[in-house]
Image (cartoon, rainbow, N blue to C red):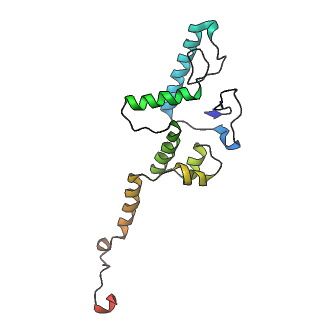
Amino acid sequence: MNIDKSLPIDWEFIDDPKNESSFGEVDMPEWYMRELKEFYHQWKIDKLKVGDLWKGGDRQFIFHSGFGEPYYPSTTTRTWAKFLKRNKFRHIRLHHLRHTSGSLLFEAGEQMKSIQERLRHSREQTICDIYVHVSKKKKKQTAKAFDKFDPKASGTSLAPTSENEVN
């Protein structure tokens, strides 16, 4: 997927992304590209159905009014909140899915540089400090890494064997 435009929060006009690091290609999983292909097919049907009422031109907004115009940003946020409530999920801001994405990739063993590029940040440190959170699963995985130092497994002991070793 190629990122070369953005729709600023004020919704006034389509513009270039805010940072140089925001431009570029993002590889997407195959299942997502299949979904996007289905969306494109539906987009063409929707555009034909409304005919002259279509206001989106050839732009293919994923979140649009049914007539091709993008939703106002708060509409997507409200829809997200309703989805969470309807499904009895804990409320998180839509933007926090970026944190979830980064944390899941980290938990899966991806390198910070790869996560940084995927989230379109110019600095790896931003990803480390803000976007990637260590999950309980990752904490347990980290603790388990110390199992290879188990003294009983290697036939040694950390317990003192004589009075001299205690002092």
Q: To which quarter of the image does residue 75 belong?
A: top right
> Left or right: 52 with respect to 109?
right
Which quadrant, please, contains the C terminus? bottom left
Q: Could you tell me which residue is drawn at 32 percent across and 88 percent down?
A: 166
The correct choice, above or below, for 46 with respect to 141 in the image is: above
The correct choice, above or below, for 150 with respect to 134 in the image is: below
Q: In front: 28, or 91?
A: 91
Q: In front: 18, or 40?
A: 18
Q: To which quarter of the image does residue 26 belong?
A: top right
> Left or right: 162 with respect to 131?
left
Q: How many marks are shown on the rendered structure?
A: 0
> Left or right: 12 with respect to 117?
right
Q: Could you tell me which residue is drawn at 28 percent across and 86 percent down?
A: 161
Which quadrant, please, contains the N terminus? top right
Q: Position of residue 159 (x, y in %)?
A: 29, 81
Q: Could you tell me which residue is drawn at 48 percent across and 48 percent down?
A: 103
Q: Position of residue 60 (x, y in %)?
A: 61, 22
Q: Position of residue 116 (x, y in %)?
A: 59, 48
Q: Residue furthest bottom?
A: 164
Q: Could you tell me which residue is drawn at 38 percent across and 36 percent down?
A: 89
Q: Position of residue 158 (x, y in %)?
A: 32, 79
